[in-house]
Every structure is written in C-alpha cells, then in structure tokens.
Image (cartoon, coloured by chain):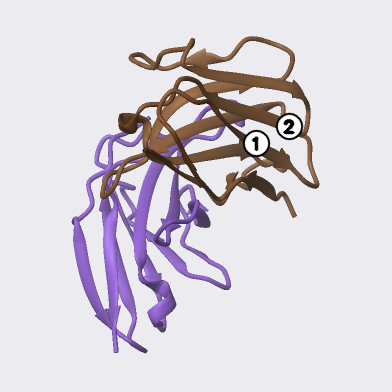
Amino acid sequence: DAKTTQPPSMDCAEGRAANLPCNHSTISGNEYVYWYRQIHSQGPQYIIHGLKNNETNEMASLIITEDRKSSTLILPHATLRDTAVYYCIVRVESAGNMLTFGGGTRLMVKP
Amino acid sequence: GAVVSQHPSWVICKSGTSVKIECRSLDFQATTMFWYRQFPKQSLMLMATSNEGSKATYEQGVEKDKFLINHASLTLSTLTVTSAHPEDSSFYICSAPKSEKNYGYTFGSGTRLTVV
C-alpha cells in the first residue's frame, strides 16, 4: 500500500469548513483513497473513499487531484463532535487485506 | 448494516490473569477479522489476522502464545490475552471487511485493558 503523509494536527472553528490534506505521491493506478476517523477511545469510523473522481456523502467530500498524488477531505460545517484523529489510507481494494494506519491528523474543532 | 460488536468495552485485571475479548459480526458474516492494538497517543498497529476455521496470522513481534486468537464461527472472533502484564495495558480493536465491495471496513468499539 502507498504511504501517506498528513499534518499531525489542525484546528478549525466550529461551523467552518475543515479541509484535511493528504499526500500520497506514490499511489498506484488501482489504489483507492480511504478516509477514517477515530474519536477518542472509540473504534475508527469509515468516512468516505474514492479512486479518481471527487466523492461526496452525508459526512464529507473527498477531493482528489487529477494526478492523484494528493487529496483533501472536507467537512463542510465542522461541529465539536468532529474533533477526532483523521486517517488517510491508500490501498488496493481487496476484502482480504488489512488497513495500515499512519499517524493521522488530530483535528480540534473549537467553539 | 455491517456492525461489529466488541465486548467488554473496558476491563481491569490483575497481573498474571487472562482476559478474553470478543468481537461479533451482528448482521454479516466475517470470514476475516483483524485485531489491532493502540497505545496512548499512537496509531493503530495490526497484531494479527484471524480467519474462520484456520490458524491466525500474527504480525512480527506479536507473541502468538500470549495473544490467543480463535475464530470458530463466521460471526465470532476472540482475542485472549494470557498471563497479562502491565505492559499489555492498551486499547484493543477488532475490524472486519464489510461484505459489500468498496464499502470499507467496520470496527468494533474497542476494549480498554488495564493490567494492575
């Protein structure tokens, strides 16, 4: 699986958009970009994933650059409950493979 | 859908005793279960992969005789920490791939183990 690089921490004001970047310059053509988050003392939660097109769901939007070497997770209106560690993971889609977690970005949403 | 129920959510045990952690897939069949460990302020580290009906595969540096994994059915995988020591105190999390393609993985809520 390709390695990812994320800033260790970010702050965001409540109600504003939170933009979390991820670099994955060695991504292969068949690797997807996944985002998970982990709220303190809980198991990780799936947010969104994509291959090359931008994706949006009820939780967030995922913007993938045209060369696929980086992506941005957007939480359009951050709330205090979005405070968590966000993990960007790049991997080949295969149900038998585990997820490899990097350091993630600790997002602090402030009132 | 695709929920993994993990129990207990927290446990305190004495050194030298054993602790069993259970993960159940509630509405899908989990032929594979991944077990992670997470120390404070660190990321999740994969410990082992269990497959229903076969022996678990352990990551390098994880003692298979200390961390016993059983995956006897398609809906239940267990991790037993044997002869626990304070350094085994950690957050243990299980995860299973969802049955639908491209739907990612579902995680248990985690077990906070404290060995005193």
Separation of marks 2 and 1 at Cα, in angstroms: 7 Å
Identify residue type, mark 2.
Leu
Q: Residue at x 28, y 35 (%)?
A: A3
**Res A26 quadrant in image:** top left
Quick one: quadrant of the C terminus of chain B? top left
Label 2 or label 1, whichever lies nearer to me, is: 1
Colour in which chain A is drawn: purple
Q: Which residue is drawn at 36% across and 71% down?
A: A83
Which residue position is annotated with label 2?
B76
Task: Find residue A23 and report its horizontal and vertical position in percent.
Answer: 24, 49
Identify residue type, mark 1.
Glu
Which residue position is annotated with label 1?
B22
Q: Can residue A30 be seen in this view?
A: no
**Res A17 quadrant in image:** bottom left
Q: Which of B4 and A51 is in front in this view?
A: B4
Task: Find residue A1 and report its horizontal and vertical position in percent.
Answer: 38, 30
Q: Residue at x 67, y 29 (%)?
A: B77
Chain under numbered label 2? B
- Kindly check if marks 2 and 1 are in contact, taking CB atoms under 8 A apart as contact: yes
Task: Find residue A43 and report its horizontal and vertical position in percent.
Answer: 50, 51
